[in-house]
Each structure stands twice: as structure tokens, then as C-alpha cells.
Amino acid sequence: MANDAVASTVDETRMGSIVNDWSGDKQAFQVPWGKAMMWIFLLSDTFIFSCFLVGYMHVRISSSIPWPNPSEVFALSFGGEPIPLILIAIMTFILITSSGTMAMAVNFGYRRDKTKTVALMFATALLGASFVAMQAFEWTKLIVEEGVRPWGNPMGAPQFGSSFFMITGFHGAHVSAGVIYLTIIANRVRRGDYDKKGNYETVEIAGLYWHFVDLVWVFIFAFFYLW
Amino acid sequence: MSAAEGQQHPISIYLWIWGLLFVLSACSYLVDYLQFEGYLRWSLILIFMFLKAGFIIAIFMHMLWERMALITVILLPPILILFLIWFMVDEGTYTFLTREIMFSAPDFVPETPSHH
């Protein structure tokens, strides 16, 4: 009671609200606990991927042997002249599209439109699966045709392989896990679990994970493939 | 009941951001396709990257509509990574210079890489 009186005297502006939320004896985050926990998990995952990318940056800076040119390494030819980085560009567009469908799935979830939520979630999972398939193709091409290994490659600095396999491998594992995660949640939506429970916040939490996977790819695309 | 629940925004905002992310991705791809070099290339890569990341976090992940307590807890800690980047750039440059000096010495015999 006394607490409420104190809280109401502090202004509810953007910065005033932070004082209100942290000032003792009450819940700090005004969101469902699952959502807060997903955010905390994503924060820790941010540090993992940051360590990978910073490690990659370090070996690339310190290498006295020239770094292989990703633009040429990841070029793909469809009969004619090789188009630089084309597969990676397609993978980028696929992942962004899947983020768009996921964002709309969350929205339709909160509107209680079960059919559209399920359809959009399955579409997201399908796009994710096709992303992983393209990555498998890319890995196969690099290992079998280009002879890239974690300890060396014919194109230049030997650290190229280890950086590539570690960063894209870890990201691919995240996408694969996301596909399974989304499929499970979409199935629960279809079954009507969240109508019974009375809310669709689980869909938004799954969405957070999926957007994060897309977010990480933005950084990998910029630093590993384009730089 | 349902009106007060969760994040409610018009569908059009997601379609707009989706389109915008497409355009930004196309722009970053063009940086490579048009073979921009040096500082122009690096700054364009970073600009498009941060714009894309910003829109994904703010709109798709709804960060724009969260309360300040959550926003600060999620967005402030990653700033510390800047220190790690700084240290590792410093360290990496040192290693590179050391290698340049060592490997270019006249009596330097490169170690034959062993087969794995």
C-alpha cells in the first residue's frame, strides 16, 4: 500500500519508469516470466556469438597470410559467369522472409486467429529448414570441391576454415533448433492449447528466439561474408 | 480481455519493415556486387548492418514498445563487447607486426605444416 503511494509520486516518463520498476518489493519486468527469461537467454547467446566473431576478427587481423576473398570463395555459377556471394544473398533473403512470417504469426496469435498463426509458423519453420539445407550444400561444396578444412585451405590464411565452420556451424545449429522449436509450438497452437490456457504469449516468446537467429545472421553476413 | 493482451500492432507495420529489410539486404549485397573497396565498403556494410539489426530488434522483437527496465537490461550489457573488440584489435595488430618482423628475417625457415 505504502509502496503504491510512493510509486505514484515518481513520474512515469521513460526514465522515471525505470526507477518505479526497480524500486524494491515488486516485480521488475512487466512482462510474462517466460518472455523475460527468453530475453535473458538471448542476451547470453549474444555474448557467445560476440566471442566467436571477435575471435574471428582477431585471427584475421593477426594473419600475415592474405585472407581468402569471401566474394570469390562463395561465388556460384549457374552455367555462365560465377555470380559473387549469390547463395549467401539468397539465404539472407530467406531468413528475413521467415522473420517477417514469424512476426505476423505472433500478431495473428494475439488476434486469436488460430488458422493463420499455425500456417505462418509452419511457413517460418519451412523457410528455416530450407536455409539449413542451403547451408548443408554450401558446406559440402566448400569441403569437397574447395578443400577447405578447419586447419587449412588452398586459398589463403588457414584460420579461414576454423572461423567459418565454427561461426556458421553454431548459427546453423541455432536455426535447426529453432525449426524444431517452432514446429512443436505451432502444433500446440493447432491443438488449441493456448486457447485453453487463455493467452498466446508462448508464440511471441518463440518469435523472439527466431528473430534473434535472423539478427545474428545480419552480423555474420556483414562481418564474415561482406568484410 | 483480449484487447488488453500482449503486443497489438497493425499488420501493415510488419509488412513495411519486412520490405525495408529486403531493400537494406539488397543494398548490402550490392556493396559486394559493385566491388566497393576500403573505407567506403566498410562504412556501408556497418550502416546497413546496424539499420537492419535496429529494425529487427525494435519492431519485430517489439523492443520499441517495452518498458525501460527491460530495454536497459538487454541493450546495455552488450556495450561491454566494445572493450573486448578494442583489446583484440590491439592484440591482433601486435601479433601481426611480430609475425611480419619474424617471418621476414633473412635466416627464417618456415616450419613445414604437418599433415593431419
Image (tube, rainbow, N blue to C red):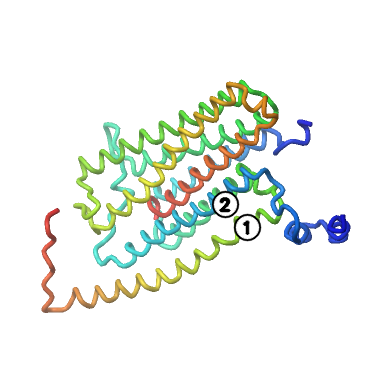
Distance of mark 2 from mark 1, alpha carbons?
Answer: 8 Å
Check disc 1 and report its element: helix, strand or loop.
helix
The residue at 37%/40% (across/down) is: A86
- Determine whether, in the image, residue B6 is placed left or right of residue B74: right
The residue at 43%/42% (across/down) is: A174
Q: Quadrant of the N terminus of chain A?
A: bottom right
- Determine whether, in the image, residue B9 is placed left or right of residue A67: right
Q: Quadrant of the C terminus of chain A?
A: bottom left
Check disc 2 and report its element: helix, strand or loop.
helix
Q: Are marks 2 and 1 in contact (CB under 8 Å)?
A: yes
The chain identifier of the residue carrying mark 1 reads: B
Q: Is residue B13 above or below residue A155?
A: above
The residue at 42%/55% (across/down) is: A223
The chain identifier of the residue carrying mark 2 reads: A
Label 2 environment density (alpha carbons within 10 Å; few <14, some 14–19, many ≥20):
some
Return the residue at label 1.
B73
Looking at this view, is A59 or A41 the one in front? Answer: A41
What is the three-letter code of the residue carrying label 2? Ile
Q: Position of residue A43 (x, y in %)?
A: 54, 53
Q: Position of residue B115 (x, y in %)?
A: 12, 55
Q: Is residue B63 above or below residue A124?
A: below
Q: Which mark is residue A136?
A: none
Q: Position of residue B114 (x, y in %)?
A: 12, 59
What is the three-letter code of the residue carrying label 1? Val
Q: Which mark is residue A40?
A: 2
Q: Quadrant of residue B107?
A: bottom left
Label 1 environment density (alpha carbons within 10 Å; few <14, some 14–19, many ≥20):
some
